[in-house]
Image (cartoon, rainbow, N blue to C red):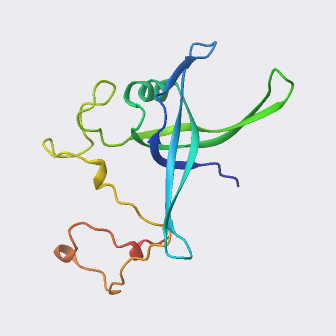
Amino acid sequence: MNLNKAFVLGNVTRDPEVRALPSGQQVTSFGLATNRFYTDQSGQKKQDVEFHNIVCFGKLADIASRYLVKGSLVLIEGRIKTRSWTNTQGIKQYRTEIITEALQLGPRSQGSSGGQYNKPFTSQENSQTKTDDIPVIEENYTPPSSSNEEPKGDEKSGGEIDVSQIPF
């Protein structure tokens, strides 16, 4: 069995570019930057940035073109595809892209104009979502130890999930 699945959460690096295929289907492409935070051997905190090419078709292309702008936070679920072509000088070129199968818009930026959606993704109408509330979890993070006894009913800690209790 084979699996080709990619999940990336990052910031849009350029405004989405909209095109149409000869069939009339809408295609939107944009760049996405993802960050990796880690601590090197000398104890210095470091950050690596990886850039991804994202391609959306059909309804997802329409959503991406309307609601995403440079700097927007977005979660992309898709598959990896590498295309190749020969350029005008006869040199074969390659481009690796993530073909979007699903996307989830991040919190809207405060005070932005056009292109952003009108409602934050929250169950409470009056609450404000801030991008600063998104935690950064480092690669070598170890959760604090907890007892092996599972809390019962109303003893659960405010709806928080204990990572050590996840079965996979």
- What residue is rendered at 39% in x and 72% in y? 163
- What residue is rendered at 49% in x and 72% in y? 140
Extreme left residue here?
A: 126
Q: Is residue 155 above or below residue 29?
A: below
* Residue 41 x/y as whole percent: 56, 76
* Residue 168 x/y as whole percent: 50, 70
Locate the N terminus by quadrant: bottom right
* Residue 53 x/y as whole percent: 59, 37
Q: Quadrant of residue 158?
A: bottom left
Q: In the image, 91: left or right of 64?
A: right
* Residue 127 x/y as whole percent: 16, 46
11 or 46: nearer the eye? Answer: 46
Q: What number of labels is visible?
A: 0
Q: In the image, 146: left or right of 21?
A: left
Q: Is residue 80 above or below residue 153?
A: above
Q: Is residue 61 above or below residue 161?
A: above
93 or 143: nearer the eye? Answer: 93
10 or 127: nearer the eye? Answer: 10
Q: In the image, 25: left or right of 163?
A: right
Extreme right residue here?
A: 90
Q: Quadrant of residue 157?
A: bottom left
Q: Quadrant of residue 87?
A: top right
- What residue is rendered at 19% in x and 77% in y? 155
- What residue is rendered at 23% in x and 35% in y? 119
